[in-house]
Amino acid sequence: MSVTTAEAARSPPPAARTRLLLEGPIVSTLLRLSAPNLVVNVVLITVTTSVDAHFIGRLGPAALAGLAPVFPLLMLMQQMANATMGSALSSALARAIGAGRREDATALVTHGLIIAIVFAVLFSLLFLLAGPAIYAVMGGQGEILAAAIEYSNVIFAGAFAYWLLGALTSVVRATGQVAILAWVYVAAEVLHIALVPLLMFGWGPVPSLGIAGAGIATVTAFTASSAFLFAYLARGRTPVRLSLTGVRLERRLFGDILSTGVPLSLQPILNNIALAFLTGYAGMLGAAALAGVGAAVRLEYLMYPVVFGLGATLVAMVGTNVGAGQLARAVRITWVAAGIAVLVTALIGVAAIVWPQAWISLFTAAPEVSGPASAYLCIAALGYAFIGMNTLTPAFQAMGQTFWPLMAVLSRAAVLAIGGWLVVSVMDGGVIGIAIVTAAGLAVGGAIVAVAFWLGMRRKLGGSQ
């Protein structure tokens, strides 16, 4: 996408933040804008879910195991709200801002909110109605299944809080004004940490709500964050203002978001289906293995805040540069971001291999659980460096391309689904076998997206990359 001379003449001069995205030094701009995004995603994906798991783990191994089948589906919703549909909204906004289409940018906000509402309703209906059957298929039985249903019903009844927060966060990210997001999310997590033990165990006049209390605390914190960001955008503090009046709904603007958001929504669906297979295979090995693998897998999700923290900045930087016709700069930005992400995820993987109990001890001290968890983590972490390559996915999305990111995650899902069945049912490989398959799946997915981006951009730039 490029801007003609006539369009450029009619467009207002870019704001200072937009000029930074188009002209600023790549490394320092990436790090400066990614730091708040990293805080946001560590809070959203890692801290929030880990706090819930920490306190629910005090109720016993069965309660902790009950979170294992819910966790991939909760991550699916969060990833779709932020990393696929949210990034689709961000990239559409960034391209409009980069091309000087301010009216379209303002209208895209309203279109994005409508899409978020529709998806929230779909998630609520699906998991409130079909959740028990899904968790049973994933290995939940007895007390484990009861715990899964109790937590799930609260979380997915409040799905709108997740989707609204994802949409509003994505609007702010598209403008490059991300510092406010770090403050909002940290404040929300302080509220969440205070509410979880209060609502779970009760105090004074507050009754003990058990596992449901953790879900209520999470939904409450997300609702408060959404209310603040809604007011912030409505006051016109960013280049794009939130206005629910005077905007005409247009098919092309819905298409601008959905054309990349819908295809790439298959990515977290496939990824979490793969992890659901992983959970199911672990469940075949017993409750202790299920709880242990469930706790260990949470460290993999720690990689995604790092990847998406850089990726969210990448959407704004790459989308704005593509909108302004600066493809070569967009490609350079992408490779720098991917290199940083690979370095960080590889270091976390090394730490997990050397000190697995440093992570596992956050959730349980029971030896029958921590033993399988440590064994799984030491091997699965060999594939963590390849997770960093997923930073390339937001760049594909910002350029309006979706095929190769989908092929990468489909290949990983196939490795986990088929390989997991072989090592558990045919080879009797146990937790070690599951861990080997996990590492192999990460390597295959990361390699595919990296090679595809390199070859594709080399063709576009005439072999100069």
Image: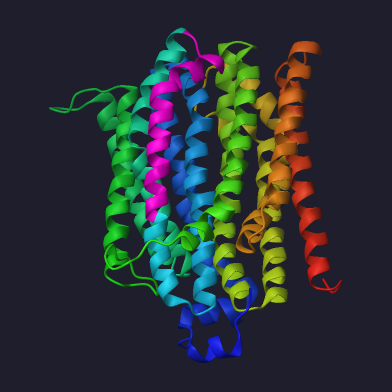
* Image spot of residue 353 (x, y percent): 70, 36
Q: Is residue 455 above or below residue 222?
A: below
* Quadrant containing the N terminus in the rendered view: bottom right
Q: Is residue 30 above or below residue 392?
A: below
Instruction: Please tell me which residue is depicted at 55% across the width and 51% down the height of the picture.
Output: 261
Is any part of residue 350 visible from this angle?
no
Is any part of residue 243 visible from this angle?
yes
- Horizontal relation, residue 410 to residue 133: left or right: right
Instruction: Please tell me which residue is depicted at 28% across the width and 62% down the height of the picture.
Output: 244
Depth order, front residue of 327/191 = 327
Q: Is residue 141 above or below residue 100?
A: above
Check residue 122 for magenta coloring: yes
Q: Is residue 79 above or below residue 71?
A: below
Q: Which contiguous range is marked in magenta?
A: 113-141
* Quadrant containing the C terminus in the rendered view: bottom right
Instruction: Please tell me which residue is depicted at 48% across the width and 89% down the height of the picture.
Output: 10
Check residue 45 for magenta coloring: no
* Image spot of residue 29 (x, y percent): 57, 73
Instruction: Please tell me which residue is depicted at 79% across the width and 55% down the height of the picture.
Output: 452
The quarter holding residue 313 reads: bottom right
* Image spot of residue 367 (x, y percent): 58, 16
* Image spot of residue 60 (x, y percent): 43, 16
Its colouring scheme is rainbow
Q: Main secondary structure of the magenta part?
A: helix
The quarter holding residue 130 reads: top left
Q: Residue furthest top?
A: 142
